[in-house]
Amino acid sequence: MSSVYNIGVSALRVAQAGINVTSHNIANVNTPGYSRQEIIQGTQLSQNMGQGYFGSGADVVGVTRQYNDFLGAQLTAAQTRSSSLSTQYDLSIQVSNLLGDANGGLSTALQDFFAAANTVANSPESLAARQTMIGSAQSLNNRVQTLNARLNDIRDSLNGQISNSANQINSYAKQIAVLNDNIVIAQAQGGTSQLPNDLLDQRDYLVAQLSQEIGVTSVKQYDGSMDVFIGNGQSLVIGTQVSSVQVTTSSTDPTSLELAYVSSKGLVSRIPQNALQGGNLGGYLSFRDTIMDPARNALGRIAIGMADTFNTQHQQGQDLSGVLGGAFFSAGSPQVTAASSNVGNSAVTATISDPGALTTDDYTLQFDGTAYTLFNRTNNTAVQSFTPAALATPQTVAGTGITLQLTPGAVADVSGDTYVIRPTVAGARDFGLLVTDPAKIAAANAVRSNAPTTNLGNATISQPVTAGTLPLDANLQQPVTITFTSATTFDVTGSGTGLPATGVAYTSGSNISYNGWTTQISGTPSTGDTFTVSPNTNATTDGSNMLNLAKLQTTNTLVNGTTSYQGAYGQLVSQVGTQTRELEVTSKAQATMLAQVTRSQQSVSGVNLDEEAANLLKYQQAYQAAAKAMSIAQSMFDSLLQLGG
């Protein structure tokens, strides 16, 4: 009777444990990171009763959580990538919408400005048309600066988001270390077969949350603790020792925050930012490097290119007062930043040598102790190297549109000293309108050709076109007379380089160039026929220079002569749009993958209420059956007592 009773009691204990664990599962069905638990049931030692070994009941060996390490690692990796892509897409769509807005973008402002320029070309004497052009130019200026300011706002907001992400990372690291301590203590008390399942769930959930902020790798130790690493293998948590990250101003860009590593002993070291992949933090850094900065640079390149080419042509013309035109727009110049870690105090200056050759890339000039090498920061490839002696004089860098020069400091540069060159980053920020007086618009040509009616031949002369380069030829408006000494030769008199000239061969329609202008004489002249090129005294009704300015709208002056202002902006919109679409597609694909991995992980670890209801019924029936067995044992014992009486 005693044996039957004890077996029943053990069965009651097992059933009760099953009900407890099942109830715990049901209670935590909505707890983030919770893994379903099950009891491990085993038999008690059987006893030899002479007739054989008779069982002595059941026992609960332990409580295990249903968790798969492989699926858990897959889920962590999927969450890291999904968070990064989602963050990049959310930021990129802001830039794409900003630049592609039909009303807020640059395209409409460009069209309005050049439409006003065409009106001035047709009616150069109209002050109303000139005032409209000034107004359109101001609108264009405002649009460029507004776009740049909005891009900067988005970029600046990244600093706050990076700081928040760093705080989250440090908070998770501290919590993981505390759980490591508790888990090690609990496992030491219970042994490897009695694991603190709920604590393990909490730690794995924190690691999953951490992976949404930054890419991590984790290694479980025999004592139950978990080591967590970030970046290039920097340890964030080792047992109960916690390292941290902190935001710091970039050594080469005062407007950017970067992440530094602070060891558990307080030593601070810089983490290569390209090693911080994955998670929200990786998304912020990747967006800044691959979308935001190239977009700002592209807008700056348009502003610089437009200011340069428009100014060059405008300064070839003449305003209503007969004065040569001045610069119409201003634009930013290249920015050079010496790394804060530099030992030397030399100065590097950069100027724009060819706006049409500018790219959207930034560059790093690094000294190796012997030579300075310019690297492209986008692809980290070497562009050109210079000796210190050579760089002491201006050096034009092929394919970049810039010229560099080094001014040695009192303290010489040492190996590793670095300078960052950003040719176009300030182009849009400093874009501005310099001409506000309508009368100062140089719509007329600076010089004009003339043929007297006394000429006997049928030759005609075209209106001269200025060279389109700066600085202007000092003799541009000096009167020049072309006198034909025969049908095939002419003399040129006047002031200027190469003047006077005699016996110049004549070919109908060929270029004749002096003093910064070019004209053509076509037809058959007679001996003694003369033609003159002199200052334009009819500037009020001449719009020929403005016509040349208006043609710049469709002239390929940017990107090595392959595209116009409008085309360059279209390329910018297209580039950001393509990147945004790419992020949208990959983000959705990764979200789908994350959902699949989550379902696989939850199929093992998730709580199924229908299954738990069935388990409750199973353990309830087991409990009732055990109680019935005990009741039978009690009844048998009572019967024996009655027989004894």
Image (tube, grey):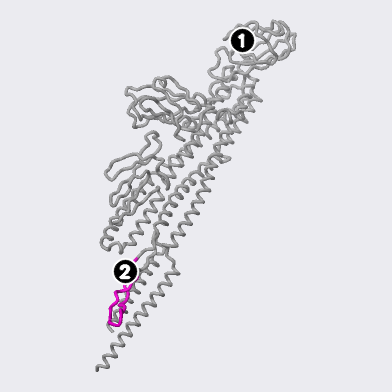
Question: Looking at numbered disc 1 in the image, what kind of residue is underneath it?
Answer: Pro
Q: CA distance from mark 2 to mark 1?
A: 111 Å
Q: Secondary structure at mark 1?
A: loop
Quarter-of-image position of residue 375: top left
Q: Residue at x 51, y 27 (%)?
A: 399
Q: Which residue in the structure is indicated by mark 2?
A: 61
Q: Which residue in the structure is indicated by mark 1?
A: 479
Classify residue 447 as left or right of residue 199: right
Vertical arrangement, residue 287 with respect to residue 430, above or below = below
Q: Which of the labelled discs sits on residue 535, or is there none?
A: none
Q: Quadrant of the N terminus?
A: bottom left
Mark 2 vs mark 1: give the one in front.
Answer: 2
Percent x, y of residue 112? 60, 33
- Residue 66 is a magenta residue: no
- Residue 58 is a magenta residue: yes
Q: Nearer the viewer, residue 620 or 297?
A: 620
Quarter-of-image position of residue 122: top right
**Whether residue 128 is visible:** no
Give the magenta-colored segment's residue range.
Answer: 41-63
Percent x, y of residue 615? 41, 72
Quarter-of-image position of residue 414: top left
Callout 1: 10 Å neighbours few (<14), some, many (20+)?
some
